[in-house]
Amino acid sequence: NDLKRRYAAQGGIFDVPKLERLLSELTQASLAPGFWSDNEKAQATLRKRAQIEARIELSQSLGKQIEEFGECQLYDAP
């Protein structure tokens, strides 16, 4: 399926394993003692964490939709 191939080629944008590692690092940072001692830095870290979570969710949603679309094409093929 061309759509699947093109989606997979966008790995740099939707590199879920990399995003999950970054999410884990930011989560660990947010649990560190003194995290809130620099309120601006803490808020920036949490904003970045939320952005990464959103990108992971988007990637997973797109992947699922592409799979479902591919399955529909199999049933609609003449």
Image (tube, rainbow, N blue to C red):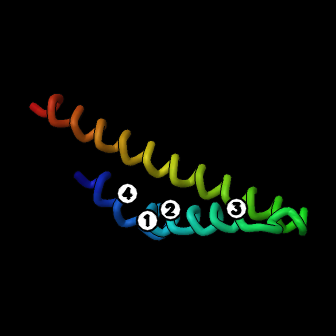
Asked whether the residues under the numbered discs 1 and 2 touch, taking CB atoms below 8 Å apart as contact, a structural biologist would say yes
Question: Which residue is identified by label 2?
Answer: 20
Question: Which residue is identified by label 3?
Answer: 31
> Residue 56, how many percent across, how many down?
51, 53
Which type of secondary structure does the marked residue at label 4 adopt?
Answer: helix
> Residue 37, how many percent across, how many down?
89, 67
The first of marks 3 and 2 along the sequence is 2
Say which of marks 4 and 3 sits in front.
3
The residue lying at 9 percent from left, 31 percent from top is: 78
Query: Which amino acid type corresponds to the residue marked 2 in the rendered image?
Result: Glu
Is 29 positioned to the left or the right of 16 in the image?
right
The first of marks 3 and 1 along the sequence is 1
Question: Which residue is identified by label 4?
Answer: 7
The first of marks 4 and 2 along the sequence is 4
Which type of secondary structure does the marked residue at label 3 adopt?
Answer: helix
Query: Which amino acid type corresponds to the residue marked 3 in the rendered image?
Result: Leu
Distance between the alpha carbons at the discs numbered 3 and 1: 21 Å
Say which of marks 3 and 2 sits in front.
3
